[in-house]
Image: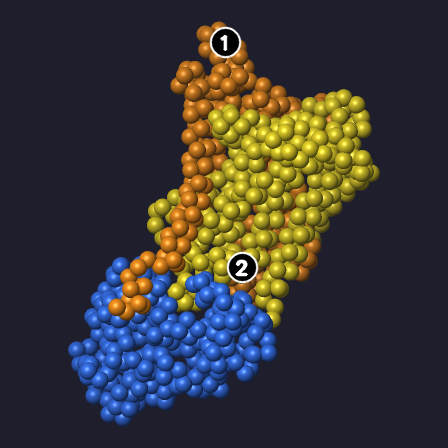
Chain colours: A orange, B yellow, C blue
Amino acid sequence: MDPIREAMLKRSRSAKLERRGRLISLFCIGLIVVIVAGIFYFVASKGLATFFSDGVNLWDFLTHSVWSPGVKDAHGSPQVGALPMIVGSFGVTFLSAIIATPFAVGAAVFMTEISPKVGRKILQPVIELLVGIPSVVYGFIGLSVVVPFIRSIFGGTGFGILAGTFVLFVMILPTVTSMAVDALRAVPSHYRSASLALGATRWQTTWRVVLRAATPGILTGIVFGMARAFGEALAVQMVIGNAALLPNNLVSPASTLTSVLTSGIGNTVMGSLENNALWSLALLLLLMSLFFNIMIRWIGKKGELK
Amino acid sequence: MNPKQADKLATGVLYTVAGIIIVILASLLGFILFQGLPHVSWHFLTSPASTFEAGGGIGIQLFNSFYLLLLAMVISVPIAIGAGIYLAEYAKKNWITDLIRTSIEILSSLPSVVVGLFGFLVFVLQFKMGFSILSGALALTVFNLPLLTRNVEDSLRQIHFTQREAGLALGLSRWETVVHVVIPEALPGIITGMILGAGRVFGEAAALIYTAGQSAPALDFTNWNPLNIASPLNIFRPAETLAVHIWKINSEGIQPDAAAVSAGASAVLILAVLLFNLVARYAGNRLYKKMTAS
Amino acid sequence: MDNYSLDDIFIRDFDRKTQEIAVETEDLRVFYGDNEAIHGVSLPFERYKITSLIGASGSGKSTFLRSINRMNDNIDGTRVTGKIMYRDVDINSDNVDIYEMRKHIGMVFQRPNPFAKSIYDNITFAPKRFGEHDKQKLDEMVETSLKQAALWDQVKDDLHQSGLSLSGGQAQRLCIARAIAMQPDILLLDEPASALDPISTSTVEETLMTLKDQYTIIIVTHNMQQAARISDYTAFFYSGKALEYDETRKIFTRPKIKATEDYVSGHFG
């Protein structure tokens, strides 16, 4: 009998290795999917308990502004109004994004259109360094520089949405900038040469042609930055004042979903309403993160269609 | 204003914006280093923290940070390599792959505080690991996996398909070819990504405050029995890291020198992260040169 | 380009008593998704001969070649039907171990693809994986295969330099050496000289001529002079079919099919 034919009809060592390797890699990727599913399952099951076992009305949760889960109101239902935190989270997110956007886009235009050399040599490393600075360091600087500064100008404690906005502005600036740079670099160079050849100045070209073509990418960067701002916990918690009250103005102590979570989850008893209510905030945070994700996809798809 | 003037004005504004960003970074670094470095001494780096009086150090926190980082990388790197191989080599174009990619995207964009809360719920309470290094390392793994996986996948995809064909045509399996040919070639990219990931993990605090805990019990650095509670190697002890320490003393610390300790700790943290960045670049370039050298 | 009839076909007969067939396809079809790229090709290949596959680009000659050792299996959405008979086994069936099969049906690709390893390791990597660890045998294997590939004299002083540091022609010969170190029965070459300069090309051709004493060689080429110089048989591919298959001499002097005649005389392609 032909030994080569025999060997071909058996399963080789390589075939066994291949099977094993494929299984190993499948296991690893499966683990990640299971973790993601697990996160949703655990946070949702805890967070929904507030509404299903403790009987809190979802609408009241989203619109009432008194957050004291341990206390019952006149009708005997617990006071878990998350509005102050929701306002705080959205407030710092939108404000920081509004301030960061012109800076980020400006820096990106500088790096791609005005001075690519300085951009690559100086701004690029600066931005990479800013990304690398840990959030507690931002929080510490906010606490020791930004808060006293605000206090000296507006009075009061200095803690509040304005301080949170400042800290988050610096934190999301590098994220938005680097994505805006990617978007601008992706604009084909013949767009620029065509416009310049028609006699447009560099600024007209940038403003009317390049930025327009890069809009979906820049928007994606802004949403990424907002997602980061919305989910940032410690840096914000250190400067916002942590008062679960609807803020009167930008310099009165306030709170965000994340700040209440970080300071509260360790001080409540598992399974109690106080604790479940916090998990509802975590669920809200999770859903918002999902929402930002969907928005990024949606912008991406819209951009492709053009 | 005519277009020429507008062009000049815009250019001026853009230079200012670029300048402001550079000034922001410079003042951030300057502040931390000027405030913090004078406080950094051998004593500061090696002695335990104190709760009530001034003069505490960050020795245990520093050790904890490195130990947690090491454990987290030991757990997450093999998983990320396996998962990256799956995505780059085996994933077919179908809905399952779409689902996997979406999961990874969602995980990478989750706020780290949510990852920490999940770790608290599952590792600390459900698996009864308590506030411990192990819980912390697992939470950091969850935090770190999506970026590492994507980095491995991208690095593998950089290697041309003909390299895989070369292995396959010799009768080797795809797995053997990937492990012995493609991964060694992709190593510079993979290592750079891992070190950058390590820097991110090193500065992370939100995922740790409810997993690795916020206390740093005294350690006996002569006891290397991993099962002893006072041993630095014990993975079941609570372990406050440097980043968590900075947060902790700033939000509820009562040390009279809290500001100085935080500044010193922040300086150390930033220098460590800078070091990770530099090493990542250097190691990547160096390895790349070595791989392609004749 | 003219449209030629796909039914006008001439495939030569082999005398199976005197001419040993190394590998043979029967009604081989390749599908990319729903698109049929190869339409039922049945070709026998004689042992210890060089057979050229020629045709315009897109005629399916490379796809056909890559099906013989099932390299197309790695491309998502590709399906191959029909039989590939090798040692009385249909190797295009699920019960054949493709890895074992590829040890005996080796392949050299269009673009030289040495591993980012030393010359020595390029050749010994696969044999080591298959369990050969005897240093002396490995050394011999390196020397023999490099000599057969006409590369030994140029690299023998520094076998530990990277395979990536070689010139295009040298790298391709390293790939040939790597393939023949496995001592395959059949060597498939997919336009091995298309990325090389004329001098390297002629060295590779000489190498192939000396190899046919020990190996059955099937080579895809777009260079008709090359096919005429080195091969014993030539198959002409057109639009996913082998239209004419005969001794090389006959293909280039007295082709029986109009399409072949037009192609070899340079009317298209």
* Residue B208 horizontal/vertical position (percent): 59, 32
Q: Which residue is tagged 1?
A: A73
Say what secondary structure mark 1 lies in. loop
Q: Amino acid at mark 1?
A: Asp
* Residue A272 horizontal/vertical position (percent): 49, 15
Q: Is residue A60 above or below residue C134?
A: above
Location of residue C69 (image quadrant): bottom left
Q: Label 2 lies in what chain?
A: B
Decide if residue C42 is on the left or right side of residue A60. left
The residue at the point 57 percent across, 40 percent down is B72
Q: Which residue is tagged 2?
A: B184
- For residue B293, the mark is none
* Residue A104 horizontal/vertical position (percent): 61, 47
Say what secondary structure mark 2 lies in. helix
Q: Quadrant of the C terminus of chain C?
A: bottom left
Decide if residue C158 is on the left or right side of residue C32. right
Q: Is residue C52 above or below residue B152?
A: below
Q: Label 1 lies in what chain?
A: A
Q: Amino acid at mark 2?
A: Pro
Query: Of discs 1 and 2, which sits in the foreground?
Result: 2
Q: Quadrant of the N terminus of chain C?
A: bottom left
The residue at the point 50 percent across, 9 percent down is A72
| Most distant residue in the bottom direction | C253
